[in-house]
Image (tube, rainbow, N blue to C red):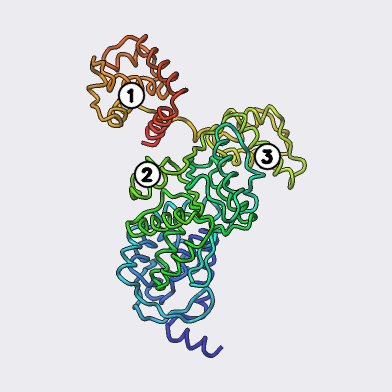
């Protein structure tokens, strides 16, 4: 106890202030979740309080910059709630050899500066960590994926609910599901049939569920399987450099049977991508299975090293497409059945399920949000659910799906850029093959993404007749139904236009 008082006296912070600071940290952890908190706040220390200002310290300039630019308002709000007379919160970099108390375990530890190579490695992927951290927050802020000591190496915790038995299959994900099952059925020593297996899908369509289901099944099949997000791979690599255990990191990573990497689009930084490429090559060449997932096909991952992309393209690439209505109904039914386990009186009529499935066509997470709103409405009001009450309950979800107003000019510019021609070519009377097809695609997108009439679209395309536009629309619909490559290009252009 006397040692503790000495510590407080040495750093000039009272026991009451320490107690308040502990409550601030606890609330930050509750707000942000374990993953984000462990990544950015465990080394944030209370230095002193003077002149109406709370002085906090961190060990590196990078950490100071990141915390200030991304979390300063939240920290200030939490500090103000505990320190009533404080007007400012200042964050400084403490001395490299300063002795600090670890607020997590109460032990003393010495901060040391990371080598320059580590600082450079951290800086290369820093811009992607915010997106990855936000992804973690949306997934309930998973705990740290890696323990970076040389004797322990584990992947991200797996959710037992995300298994093959709970994965609902429809036309849009049937191929991806079958490929994942085939990979999971293999036993140790079997040569992989699809290596690497690359799955891509937009947000909320089930790729993480599929990857975790595969990891569960592979582990149950006595294969050493590691599931990691790209962020965790990056943080593990940088941490191994900091602790001088990079060799152990590489050896343990390459000694597994199945490596599963989620959200590979976040993989950034030259040195990190090189290490990932070496790991990928070592595992595939040794007959070990690699499974990768991203939010887009390999051809659209412009930031990744060409050698990595080449490996991806050499495996099996499967797409998880948008949910069709029948699959959306199955997802809703499953979510409702799960909700009834805790609320037995919760009843959703078939016509309400059909209405929600027709209205919300985005992804599984929005469907889950719709069930939560229906459950709240039914339990809090006690009124039976009807289509009218369901419309009111999910109104905010429907409103977020209102299509962005896309301009024909934007469509023409994007299509011209994609096909490496000029916008004037699209508007011209030229009928060469390299101009006609992009022109027809631009007319098709103008019809499906805007409210313009066929005659008006024709006028915007060099004064063409409405029958020419109608022919173009029908032609592209016919070609897209047969040519998967063209269908993917059209979906890509739609997504870009909706996000601009």
Relative to 153, is 271 on the left or the right? left
What kind of element bears circle 3? helix
Secondary structure of the residue carrying numbered label 2: loop
Q: Quadrant of residue 427?
A: top left
**Residue tagged by mark 3?**
334
Q: Is residue 280 above or below residue 420?
A: below
Query: In the rendered image of this protein, does residue 33 appear above or below residue 178?
Result: below
Q: CA distance from mark 2 to mark 1?
A: 27 Å
- Name the residue at 51% across, 33% down: 399
The residue located at (70%, 39%) in the rendering is 378
Q: Residues within 10 Å of mark 1 (few under 14, many from 20)?
A: many
Mark 3 vs 1, N-terminal side: 3
Residue identifier under label 2: 301
Task: Say which of marks 2 and 3 sits in front.
Answer: 2
**Nearer to us in this view, 298 or 477:** 298
The percent position of residue 419, horizontal first and vertical second, equals 29, 29
- What residue did someone put label 1 on? 408
């Amino acid at each position: 106890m006397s040692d503790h008082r000495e510590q407080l006296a040495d750093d000039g912070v009272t026991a009451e202030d320490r107690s308040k600071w502990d409550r601030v940290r606890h609330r930050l952890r509750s707000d942000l979740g374990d993953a984000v908190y462990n990544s950015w706040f465990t080394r944030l220390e209370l230095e002193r309080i003077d002149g109406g200002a709370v002085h906090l310290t961190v060990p590196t300039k990078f950490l100071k910059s990141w915390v200030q630019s991304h979390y300063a308002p939240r920290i200030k709000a939490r500090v103000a709630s505990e320190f009533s007379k404080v007007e400012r919160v200042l964050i400084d970099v403490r001395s490299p050899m300063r002795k600090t108390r670890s607020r997590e375990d109460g032990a003393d530890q010495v901060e040391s500066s990371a080598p320059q190579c580590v600082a450079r490695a951290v800086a290369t992927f820093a811009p992607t960590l915010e997106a990855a951290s936000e992804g973690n927050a949306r997934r309930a802020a998973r705990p740290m994926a890696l323990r970076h000591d040389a004797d322990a190496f584990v992947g991200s915790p797996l959710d037992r609910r995300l298994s093959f038995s709970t994965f609902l299959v429809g036309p849009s994900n049937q191929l991806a599901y079958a490929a994942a099952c085939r990979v999971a059925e293999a036993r140790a020593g079997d040569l992989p049939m699809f290596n690497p297996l690359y799955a891509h899908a937009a947000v909320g369509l089930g790729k993480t569920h599929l990857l975790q289901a595969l990891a569960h099944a592979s582990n149950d099949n006595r294969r050493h399987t590691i599931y990691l997000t790209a962020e965790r791979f990056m943080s593990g690599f940088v941490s191994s450099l900091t602790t001088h255990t990079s060799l152990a990191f590489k050896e343990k990573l390459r000694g597994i049977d199945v490596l599963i990497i989620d959200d590979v689009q976040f993989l950034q930084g030259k040195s990190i991508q090189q290490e990932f490429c070496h790991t990928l090559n070592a595992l595939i060449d040794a007959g070990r299975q690699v499974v990768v997932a991203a939010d887009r096909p390999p051809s659209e991952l412009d930031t990744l090293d060409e050698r990595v992309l080449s490996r991806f393209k050499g495996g099996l690439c499967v797409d998880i497409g948008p949910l069709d209505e029948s699959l959306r109904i199955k997802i809703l039914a499953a979510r409702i059945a799960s909700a009834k386990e805790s609320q037995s009186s919760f009843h959703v009529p078939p016509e309400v399920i059909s209405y929600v499935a027709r209205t919300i066509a985005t992804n599984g997470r929005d469907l889950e949000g719709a069930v939560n709103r229906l459950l709240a409405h039914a339990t809090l009001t006690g009124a039976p659910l009807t289509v009218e009450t369901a419309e009111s309950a999910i109104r905010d979800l429907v409103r977020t799906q209102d299509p962005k107003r896309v301009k024909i000019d934007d469509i023409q510019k994007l299509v011209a850029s994609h096909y490496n021609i000029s916008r004037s070519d699209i508007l011209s009377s030229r009928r060469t093959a390299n101009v006609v097809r992009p022109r027809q695609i631009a007319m098709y997108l103008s019809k499906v993404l805007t409210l313009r009439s066929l005659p008006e679209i024709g006028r915007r395309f060099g004064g063409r007749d409405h029958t020419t536009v109608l022919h173009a629309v029908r032609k592209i619909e016919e070609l897209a139904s047969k040519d998967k490559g063209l269908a993917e290009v059209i979906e890509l252009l739609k997504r870009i236009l909706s996000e601009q």
